[in-house]
Image (tube, coloured by chain):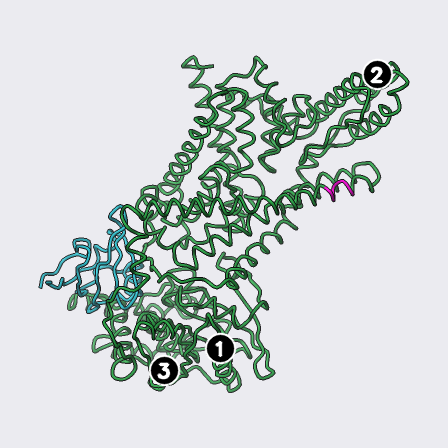
Chain colours: A green, B cyan
Amino acid sequence: MDHPRENLIALAGNPNCGKTTLFNAITGARQHVGNYPGITVEKKEGYCQVNGRQIQLVDLPGTYSLTAYSLEELVARNFLIQDRPCAVINIVDSSNLERNLYLTVQLLELGIPVLIALNMVDMATARGVEINSEELGRRLRLRVIPMVARTGSGKAELLEAAAQLVEKVTDWEPLYISYGPDIDPVLDSMEAQIRAAAFLTDSLPARWTALKYLEADEEVIRKGKDKDATLSSKLEEVAGQVSKHLQKTLDSYPEAIIADHRYGFISALLKEGVVKQSHKADRLYLSDQLDRVLTNRFFGPVIMMLIIYAVYKFTFTYSKVPVGWLEAGFSELGRFADSSLPPGPFKSLIVSGVIDGVGGVLGFVPLIVFMFFAIAFLEDTGYLARVAYMLDRVFRTFGLHGSSVMAYIISGGIAGGCAVPGVLATRTLRSSRERIATLITAPFMNCGAKLPVFAMLIAAFFREKEAQVMFLLTILSWVAALLIAKLFRSTILRGPSTPFLLELPPYRLPTFRGLLIHTWERAWQYVRKAGTIILAISIIFWALMSFPGLPETERKIYDEERASILAVASQGVKEPLLNAGASAGGEATQPKSPFKPQAAVNPAGGSGSLASLQEIDNEEAQAALKNSIAGRIGSGLTLITSVNGFDWRTNVALLSGIAAKEIIISTMGTAYSLGRTGRGEQIPLSRRLAADSSWSPLKAFALIIFIMLYAPCLPTVTCIIRESTWRWGLFSMCFNTLTAFIVSALVYRGGLWLGLG
Amino acid sequence: MAVVLLREMAKGQTGTIHRVTASGEIGRRIRDMGLVPGTRFKVQGRAPLKDPVAIRLRNFTLTLRNSESDFIEAEVEEV
């Protein structure tokens, strides 16, 4: 068999057994979070020093078993088989011993040296359960260290024991369990055949392989086929016969019998002197009493609404201040670059492409930090599992999972969220079909960046009805998201819903340190992404909206107009005007920032002439935008978007909105020659649109619907790619835009037909 | 003792698992969570919309959908 890798230890355990707490306690800040190659399961690594030896610790995903059904289980198993750690620290929740030992037994059957960390012994004691850890260790022939990971008690002994395992590396010694008269003889003969042919024995114990054939484990059987197809089919045939026989005689399956015997083995193990229960087992503990209220038919949903609302409030209220700091910092940086770099395309690239683009993305960081903190809190206390439990019935109707709700709400299910943390929140969903459906539909929610755009259009066309329209839009986004999710789950993501079988862990107060580590990891991953992909994307968008610029002849016309105004202006105001004209003119000849509204040049004096100068600048900016690649695409798209009633101005604004939705307003401002209108300065644009005879409430509504549904902003797409594959990221852009186009065209054409236009 | 499906059991009732009729992924998940014949459990409650159901067994609480609890046959203890 392959030799174990020196100084490498894996950490395995059930979900909710305190594995992460222990990992944090051992490795402290010295850890690294990444993904297992090619998949989205998180891989955490850390280091610790014991007796002058550096030990590498890998935190395996939390699993109940080591079958190959879920990605997490497969990852954990393959890590043990392929990376060959010298030992596994198996964390076992002592208040839930039987089920936790089910994983232990499977680890032992694999043969890897195991050290049991018997966690939460304080809680077990409080519940009147006493465990004789020495006796348990003696019966399993391994060491059992009682401990409390939260407080760190027992940690030193655990590390000491781990160091001993690392020092005297032993070969794998699989545990043999009897599976009864129907399975054992077959297992023995299969084992002998496997051993004789040295079938997969370089990495797997023979009996384990035989057992997996009986359990019909697809992964192992596939590996076996590659290795030796004849023997593999022979083993499959034997397994098939056993299965048939068992179904005939006992109306059962081999895997059922195997599971029964594993649990039987555990029961026998715990009998007579290992576990002592001093009072009744089914007594109601504080956690159960809490559940009586928190999952009550009437109070449960009400409290849940309040808690979700509180998370939302917490995230978006408290992140406002640091978001403001970051924004101010980046605009200061922009100003600094603006004043210290020589004018020209390079400066424009740095200021508008790099600083504004990356700054816009990093501005989300405080939001993400607060959201992850809140989610980590709900998750670690155990409440999130209750939310999934209570809402599963509703979401299942649409092919989703109870856990989808969090992603929806954070994305803007209560208007004003953000899809970036929303998409990241889908991590709490374990199954892939439901998760992808949630990922693609969560950006339909009305995030905080869409709101100012909606507000501008509502102010222009739906005066006096702001609240009603906003409420309607919130409802519409939920309806759209749920219906599209349903559509996905009955077409491209068709398939039975993943088994629910969710554990409701006892309520626990999370440690502040754990929450901070949790939050930091996620936020850092996001920041790293912003430095790479998003930087490249913002440069591309900057170029699209900046080049090729105006042809020389046209630029001259604007320059001449400016010159004529300056000539007419009185001597007293000439000086400031000259400065203003020079800087404004200089600015207009080079590409303007597509990402951030630049403050209008407004020095004192000469307001009349200055206003006309400003007008010329604005017209030039409009002409430059129309002439840019993005402008040309926008004009070209009118062929299609005339169905929705969108002209080139709307199109180019929508195009820029793919970078970030709030930019729609500033681009539209430029396209309507209003100069750059920033956030909070939508009033002139709103008035301009209201006065425009080519606009109507119907058209505005069709546009709102389009903005609600079309391609997610690039930071969101980047996160979708991170959480799934780049294909799904691309799909979300195309599919969502197509959906937006169809729905908004139906609204517009239907409205016209009804005579609403 | 009557053998019934878990779905038919009322809140507060205690039973012992008689048989798990599922195979494949769903069957394995059910068994992995400790739902094997002979296991005693208590119906702790149901979600506000009557589904999923929460049961207490082996010192922990497990929730499963009604469609999944249809695979579980239990002997109900008379009170």
Query: Splitting the image into 4 quarters, where does residue A5 fall?
Result: bottom right
Span highlighted in magenta in the image = A332-336
- State the mark number for residue A155: 1
Residue A43 coordinates in the image, percent (x, y): 52, 63
- Determine the residue located farthest toward the right in the rendered image: A571
Does residue A209 appear anywhere in the picture? no
A161 shown above or below B71 = below
- State the mark number for residue A565: 2
Query: Splitting the image into 4 quarters, where does residue A271 fall?
Result: bottom left
Q: Give the amino acid at mark 2.
A: Ile
Chain letter behind tag 2: A
* Left or right of A750, for residue A280: left
Look at the numbered disc 1 and give the secondary structure of its residue. Answer: helix
Per the model, the C-alpha gap separating discs 3 and 1 is: 15 Å
To which residue does mark 3 refer?
A133
Per the model, the C-alpha gap separating discs 3 and 2 is: 92 Å
